[in-house]
Image: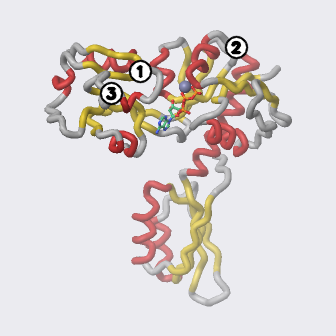
Amino acid sequence: MKLKIAVQKSGRLYEDSIKLLKECGIDISNGVNKLKSEASNFPLEVFFLRDDDIPQYVEDAVADIGFVGENVVYEKKKKVDVVEKLGFGKCRLSIAVGKGDVYTGVNFLQGKRIATSYPVLVQDFLDKNGVTADIHEISGSVEIAPGIGLAEAICDLVSSGSTLFMNGLKETETILQSQCVLIKNQQLAVPLQEILNKLLFRIQSVKKAKNNKYILLNAPNDKLDEIIGLLPGMKSPTVLPLAEKGWSSVHSVLSESEFWHIIEKLKEAGAQGILVVPIEKMII
Ligand code: ATP
Ligand code: ZN
């Protein structure tokens, strides 16, 4: 039995999706211009599709699972479960208005025309804020709508904001923070769920490894206790004596979020020769 996964055929999610599967040790032959591919060393069949179609295929069990942006999942409102955030494809769905407009709050949108490819999410946002506006659904190049007189505001995906800026717009509200997620069919058969559990275990190990660094440092023995006290580590750190008397080598794992803060403290406490190494997989 094979688990069928839907990934974007080409576009912003394609490369990171394939990369994540590779990092999970899953080899798939290059799928560009192909609809389907099989992993050689894992019970996985890969379907390459337009991202917009992935929630429907997963609801219908044409694919058992899929990698797709949260923006698409919540816009399409299909009956699928979001299982895991994948940490790539990060962007936000935002409202933007003309650079010169005086934006005083959501009420600015009352009675205005909003161009978007996300009518469902925009309507939800307007309803929540008690605002009535006229939503114009367009499928692409939303950012040019105000310039050609189609709308007074837009709602579109943003990452840096440079596209908005170049089109004379400014971002005023974020209605959704999005990233690529793993979705699954709600009636997955037990053997398929077991394969998914194996895949999830690998994905989580890859994600943890990315969020952590391996650190090695030299510490004078009289400062060891203080230095060890600064290191969280998976268990306690590894401490090895150095050839030079009175010194030890200390090895540990640090998470990205606390990394710089702890490095500064380690230096202050007398640590020297600090080496930081990426971790490939982290199995806990
Ligand atoms: P398809 O041909 O598969 O329909 P598309 O043109 O709809 O592709 P892409 O532009 O490749 O889609 O974007 C795919 C997904 O990438 C988006 O739905 C979103 O989740 C994510 N994404 C991340 N950053 C951005 C960004 N700056 N702009 C647009 N999408 C982004
Ligand atoms: Zn699309």
Q: Residue under circle 1?
A: 118
- Picture quadrant of residue 176: top left
Residue in front for this viewpoint, 216 or 83? 83
Q: Quadrant of the N terminus?
A: top right
Q: Is residue 202 visible?
A: no
Q: CA distance from mark 3 to mark 1?
A: 20 Å
The coloring applied to the image is secondary structure
Identity of the residue drawn at 74% across and 34% down:
32
Q: Is residue 227 above or below residue 88?
A: below
Is there CB contact under 8 Å for labels 1 and 2?
A: no
Q: Residues within 10 Å of mark 2 (few under 14, many from 20)?
A: some
Residue in front for this viewpoint, 243 or 77? 77
Which residue type carries mark 1?
Answer: Tyr
Q: Residue under circle 2?
A: 62
Q: Residue under circle 3?
A: 148
Q: Residues within 10 Å of mark 3 (few under 14, many from 20)?
A: few
Q: Secondary structure at mark 1?
A: loop
Q: Nearer the viewer, mark 3 or mark 1?
A: 3
